[in-house]
Image (cartoon, rainbow, N blue to C red):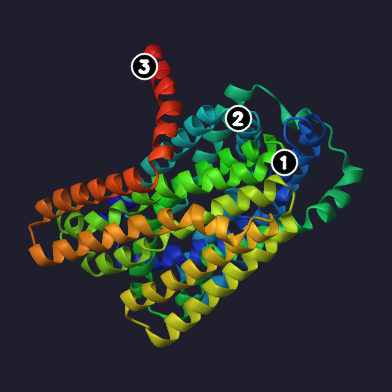
Amino acid sequence: MTQLVLSLILSRSDFGIWAIALSASVLLTNFRGGGMLQWLIQGGTERYVVRAGPAFWTSLVFNVLLGTLIVAIALPVSKFYGEPQVFEIMIISGASFPLITLGAFYKTTLSIKLCMGQVTLIEIASAVVRSGLTICLALTGLGPLSFVLPLPASYIVESIMGHHYERSRPWRLSRQLRSWHRLVFQNRWILSGTLVTTLTINVDYIVLGRLTSLSTLGVYFFAYQLTFVTAVLVTDNARRVMTPAFVAVDPSRRTNAVLRATNAYLLFGSPLLLLLGAVVGGVEPIIWRAKWTDAILPIQILSFSLPSQLLTVIAQASLQSSGRFRGWTAVNAIRASLAAGGALVAGTLFRSDVSAICAVMALAFVVGNLSQIVLTFYNQRIGLFSMIRQTWAGLLAAPACLIVVLLLLHQLSPSPIISVLTGGLVFVVLNAICIGVFARHDAMQLARLALPRLKRLGDVG
């Protein structure tokens, strides 16, 4: 919702400036906590008491150092891209970064205890505060600064709500200073994996920011963010659920759990992520009045890469739950390399053609994501045939339905409202048919699990 409003207020160049600042700062901010929170999750409930103190204090020290480093590199990055506002954005981002520590620790603790409802409420409250302030600041004419000025307030909200639900005081836990150097060395693969994961997500902005104009980068950033916003919501919540859940599963049964999760997750998640591609052609003229017309095709192209994006969650949760952080780093390095290569090729060959850039990047994302899941399953000793049998329908059904919808809309050329209604309805119906054909058993199983929970929620309401 925030991006929808901001895209009406801010210019393409504003989005381009934010993309550059985001790519530079996120490279460091994704090191938040120095990998200690992943280490805390991997230990599960059995080792929580022993690991909580060192995890919190080491996270805090890392975050202070990272915030300082972001501030230190703000000027060089700003000069490299020739954009003064990048300096201001990175200064604010770095100065507020240590505030993220407490809220992140509380959310991790609640995730370990599988209190996902409380984690969701914390994130909703934080998002409401951040989004509301961002929109208000953008309306006052602050431009790209509107993206970062609300960050301190959102971090504080997460800390307050986390303390309300968890009631613990991690700052009173033992620091165990003598063990810090050992923990950092022990978690070196978590840090390495975090680096390459961050590169995968942001390397396209880093490379394209140097090779293309701010306007071109702004359109690409708009299309990418709008396409992947639903994917981020789905994958982040799934990752938060799956990793602790896989940790709790007996290792002898973990392979079967991974396969079942992959099948259901793909088949039911993919249509949700590709729905935007089916309706964006009608949504754009209704909301933006042709301001972002040249982002329609890029959004549709990027949408086809989303089902494979879901596989990265399965891969990460599977490897991290079994403590195979070195393998996680290795498979992520392949994704990062492909994303960097794709951005370099796209930016060099198609400097101003956003659709062509998105086509190259979508191909790079798909190849990288599929490579990651193949290597992960191989690492987990899951056969190639079992993997294909569990993933082919989920990977292909929703994209095939989207192709049918786009061809239909191209032939009909309806008005924007009719395009949204027709595209959305046909896409949903086609996917429902695919689920009925390819996953009737899984659909019935999920329904049996979901209906009692929905009934309980209704009784509570």
Label 2 – label 1 distance at C-alpha: 21 Å
Check the image and report above or below for 3 versus 447.
below
Mark 3 crowd level (few <14, some 14–19, many ≥20, 10 Å Cα): few
Residue at x-position 40% and y-position 44%: 439
| Mark 3 vs 2, N-terminal side | 2
As shown in the figure, which amino acid type bears the numbered disc 1? Ser
Depth check: 259 or 282 in front?
259
Q: Where is residue 84? Give x, y as percent.
A: 47, 70
Tag 1 secondary structure: helix
Q: Which residue is disc 3 drawn over?
A: 458
Looking at the image, how many numbered discs can be counted on the residues? 3
The residue sitting at 59% across, 63% down in the picture is 374
- Rendered image quadrant of residue 284: bottom left
Q: Which residue is mark 2?
A: 114
Helix, strand or loop for disc 3? helix
Label 1 sits on residue: 252
Tag 2's secondary structure?
loop
The reply, left or right, for residue 356 in relation to residue 339 is left
Q: How many residues crowd mark 1 within 10 Å: few (<14), some (14–19), many (20+)? A: few
Name the residue: 37% across, 74% down: 359
* Whole-number angstrom distance, CA of label 3 to CA of label 1: 37 Å
Extreme residue in the right direction: 178
Q: Is residue 267 visible?
A: yes
